[in-house]
Amino acid sequence: MMDELPVEVLKTVFHFLLDDPVSICRFELTSQSNCKLVRNSPELFQEILDFRWTKGNERNNETDINPRKEFERRYEQDQIAIKCVNDMANTLRIELGEHASSMNNFPSVGKSWNNPNWTLLLLELRLDAYDILKSMANALIDYKAEVLKQNLCRFLAARTVVRIHISQCLLEWKKITSSDYGEYQATQIESEATQIEKLALLAAKAQMTPPELLDETNPMEVDVTKHLDRIADKCRTTITNTSSRSNKEKILVISEVLFGEMGFAGNNEDYYNYKNSLLNHLLKSKKGIPMTLAVLFACVARRLNIVTDIIGLPGHVVLGFFDDTTSKQLYLDVYRGGKIMQLEECQRISSSYGFAWDDNFIRPLPPLQVYTRILNNLINCHGQLPVLSAPPLFRETLAFQARQLMLAHKMPYIVERMLQDRPLTMPIDLLSLYGLLHANDGQCAWSRDTDS
């Protein structure tokens, strides 16, 4: 009967099985037509690869990769990852004891537990396991089976996703900072503007909470880039409609769009919220600190081929640009609605913070110094939070990850060792998220400072 169906109908049936590799193999065996269809249609397996696996897909686009073979390889890797997580959960379940219902009063787990499967997942499978681990972390509870075992599996999968993510951030940092932008024949300023955007996005990626990672459908950096493109398109249209020709006129258009029409502003009410330092959160809340607002402005200006400089004054950040109508350098206070400033006002800002003026204060910050300031801001913001009566969830995880990026930034020669050194620690907020810690039992036995 299946042999009588048109090929297009069979392909439609096949598409319904994209998320079920086992059924795809069974589908192939149901008839000669299906067998022929599956074996002679590599594009169908390419669709499965693109649909089922969002990470580690660089291999998928290589012309010499057989989509079916790659599908089989990825599916096999998924099964290994599932077995690893289940074995780890079984080991922990035995350690906890038969009557345990949570991880409370079990101090040895966070400090001494070391399972070879953890190393296998992090160092060998890594991105190949990312999607299946996300699926396991988001799995619904089957209350007919043992809940603790399921929660352990979900927790361990989520913990591994977070670890893989921060490892990829470290690798991305190496890639960005070692890139030879000269091979793209771009000007030095264009190259620096591009690098600033990439580093700002990297800092934002490294500050994604576990729930944000697990809920992510599209890569955060893709959404941010599209958002910046839309803002730039709006500015471009306004520049065309107003016949703005000079550099200053174009800068004023961007300023009006960002701070007037779209309402971006400094966050005076909640200045030390770490989200103020993150480009993705700035685009959502439209509230930020001087550095993030300056990065936003520079990212939009870059798309319009307008040169801007990020200027790090003592205690403040402004944007510098060249006024081609007067042949003077002017400054834009992005934290105060895009106010245009002369050099004298920059000098007054410096003086207000107790610094004698130095012409080096108005030298443009290179990308890595912008990145350093972003990380310093994040670390300082996380350091402010312990004084709060109710610090935000995952504060310690995010603080640790900011320190990891700063450590890699200051000592790049230890990045490889950081990638290899992946001890399993038990972040309290993540344990609570998966019902493995009872809130009314007080502090956990292991140190909160060991979170990573």
Image (tube, rainbow, N blue to C red):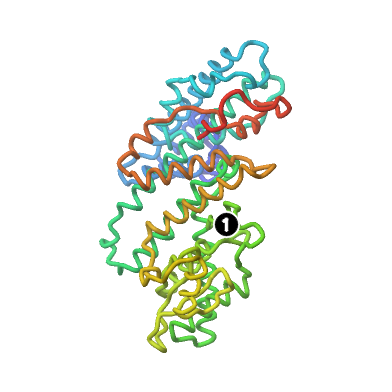
User: Among all residues in the image, which is located at the extreme right?
Assistant: 440
Q: Position of residue 298 (x, y in %)?
A: 46, 68
Q: Quadrant of residue 15?
A: top right
Report whether 134 appears left or right of 313: right
Split into 4 quadrants, where in the image is the N terminus?
A: top right
Q: Nearer the viewer, residue 162 or 140?
A: 162
Q: Is residue 48 visible?
A: no
Q: Position of residue 115 (x, y in %)?
A: 46, 20
At x 54% / y 67%, what residue is drawn? 230
Q: Nearer the viewer, residue 377 or 308?
A: 377
391 versus 132 height, above or below:
below
At x 46% / y 71%, what residue is drawn? 319
Q: Is residue 81 visible?
A: yes
365 versus 306 height, above or below:
above
Q: Amino acid at mark 1?
A: Asn
Total numbered labels: 1
Q: Nearer the viewer, residue 147 or 368?
A: 368
92 versus 170 height, above or below:
above
Q: Position of residue 19 (x, y in %)?
A: 55, 37
At x 56% / y 46%, what residue is drawn? 382
Q: Position of residue 328 (x, y in %)?
A: 39, 84
Q: Which residue is mark 1?
A: 276
Crowding at dot 1, Cα within 10 Å, few <14 / some 14-19 / many 20+, comes out as many
> Element at badge 1?
helix
User: Among all residues in the image, which is located at the extreme top?
Assistant: 98
